[in-house]
Image (cartoon, rainbow, N blue to C red):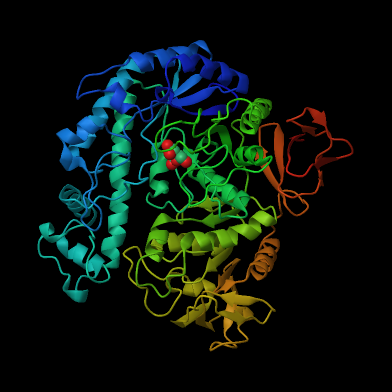
Amino acid sequence: MIPEGLAYGGDYNPEQWPEEVWAEDVRLMREAGVNMVSVNIFAWALLEPSEGTYDFSRLDKILALLHENGIAADLATPTAAPPAWFFRAHPQALPVDRDGRGLSYGSRQTFCPSSPEYREAALRIARVLGERYADHPAVVMWHIHNEYGCHNAECYCDVSAAAFRRWLRERYGDLATLNDAWGTTFWSQWYHDWDEIIPPRATGAVPNPTHRLDWRRFCSDELLSLYKAERDVLREAAPSIPATTNFMVMYNFDALDYWRWAPELDVVSNDHYLRSTDPESEIDIALSGDLVRSLAGGPWLLMEHSTGAVNWQPVNRAKTAGELRRNALAHVARGADGIAYFQWRAAKAGAEQWHSAMLPHAGTDSQIWRDVVALGADLKALAEVRGTTNPASVAVVWDWNARWALELPSQPSESVRYLDLVRSWYEPLWRSGVAVDFVHPSADLSSYRLVLAPALYLVDDSAAANLTGFAAAGGSLVVGFHSGAVDTNCHVRLGGYPGAFRDSLGVRTDELFPLLPGESLALSDGGTASLWSERVRLEGAEAVTSYTSGPLAGTPAVTRHIYGEGTAWYVATHPDPSTLAGLLDRIRTEAGVEPVRKTPEGVEAVLRRGAEADYLFLVNHGDRAAEVEVAPGATNLLTGVAAAGGTVVVPPGDVVVAREVRG
Ligand code: GAL
């Protein structure tokens, strides 16, 4: 990481251009206030033109040029895109998909994660780079690989099968334990020999759920072991340079259990792209930022996002006026200490020629370039925000194991999707301006007042005890439908649903009644419910709202239970957005949770806390100017203008960062 202030830059791929262009690149970088770029991400084929022969001349020049211009380098190991010569020499390192189809080279991120030849080649180039550039003054961070798991999270070849078996032996020790965990007496799947076990390849009927779940765990761990191996090689060669790899916590990417990854990174970084079909992508940015900050346990880096359209959606929309700035500063608000883009200069050739960049095809006489330069000035003005934290008294439980299990085939309803559920609970909290962390189910919860578990289908015994213990000790716990249903092996918890949480919630469900797409039920509080219902019986809890239509009329839909010193709520259905918002508002008010600041609708308020001052980020997503109260003597850091009369006005589409001195 750069020594001070916020980082600003993007992926810089000068190898896409003749050398004459580079001088203009660095001149324009300086003009825009760029102070750190990621280089070498996809340059393997040029760096190592044939196995074991290297050509560092280009990279040497690039790093020297950056250094002369005061721009730091986040130097990548190029291992996400092995060259053609590698696959010609080692065709067995190409991946095989679930249907048994072998994939070819000619793109990127197409290799078998378990291939020993790939590992050897990747570690070799990492070591050579580490040794060559360990003391290079431009290099401030290692960018290991690129987006692990993007396109190549799973390989179903025989080499992967053997690696999977090794992983399973480690997990289970003996076959009897594995057979028991996987419930292999069902459908005659009993394994008598380790070698009988294969990846969950395409087969005629539904796969064994625990087999499939363990496969996902294995695939995440397999890539993690590659990351760790590269990191260790670099640490040995250059112990003082921190390492990162860019996560993708959003847009339906779910291949990696980032709770297991994050502690292995020196700096946590994330890539975030808007989905053209999301009319409120500001909520997606907020959720992503809160999640990645929680993974990092503090500030993090936005390693990639876009200045405008991407090229990988069915229709790739440009950003509207002011959106580039709002997006970037919203990430900073949620804890980003640096903002970077894919990529610096828009490519004229290659697979991403229609992807936006900091310097667009149109050149500097363009809106994007003007916005990029202006953002550089904003980030400079926000330098002192670096390292500050985001206090929160609400935690939302997030778990990739629960997500994988919930979305296995042959569930009660395939309409139940993890991210949709979490977002539907997150949205009302976002709208009311409540600060939220995400937590692993077994995290220390003692600093929170309110813990929400919207979708915790799978939970192990100790995590369940952690959550219910939080309520018993005086916290407010809110549990979403179908949570606690299965244990860590995906076995149903018997005796009634919601298994692990039955006692703490004071309810017992004997049968599930998921709803058809488009079907909805009336609720006694005037709202409606969709997606899910279940026959809940009260066993100590009170009904907050009940169904007034459908086969379960009269049955509780939301319940509240005094449990120990605290309260445990069960949301046994999917209430419509305003009913859910009303419910969560009531719950958080009872729990004593206040919004960061009272703001008019559409104005997002996020607080970063420093040693002496608070930084109140106000992002106006609406089309009307908004007046917001700030502390006496506050100053807008972006303009240097002091707030008059204890309020600031945030023009439509604009951002204010009020520096409020504490004490
Ligand atoms: C990311 C990737 C970048 C670029 C970008 C385009 O997933 O890391 O290299 O492809 O997407 O949006």
The answer to whether one can see residue 159 in this image is: yes
Task: State the residue at coordinates (31%, 43%).
Answer: 223
The answer to whether one can see residue 473 in this image is: no
Residue lying furthest right: 645
- On screen, residue 455 versus residue 427, left or right, reads left
Q: Is residue 174 above or below residue 23?
A: below
In the rendered image, the quadrant that contains the C terminus is top right
- On screen, residue 493 versus residue 564, left or right, reads left
- Residue 68 place in picture, x, y as percent: 50, 10
- Residue 176 place in picture, x, y as percent: 16, 65
- On screen, residue 239 versus residue 7, left or right, reads left
Task: State the residue at coordinates (48%, 17%).
Answer: 21
- Residue 99 place in picture, x, y as percent: 23, 58
Q: Quadrant of ligand 1?
A: top left
Q: Is residue 225 above or below residue 345?
A: below
Seen from the viewer's position, the closer of residues 448 and 194 is 194
Q: Which corner quadrant of the image does residue 108 belong to?
A: top left
Seen from the viewer's position, the closer of residues 244 and 252 is 252
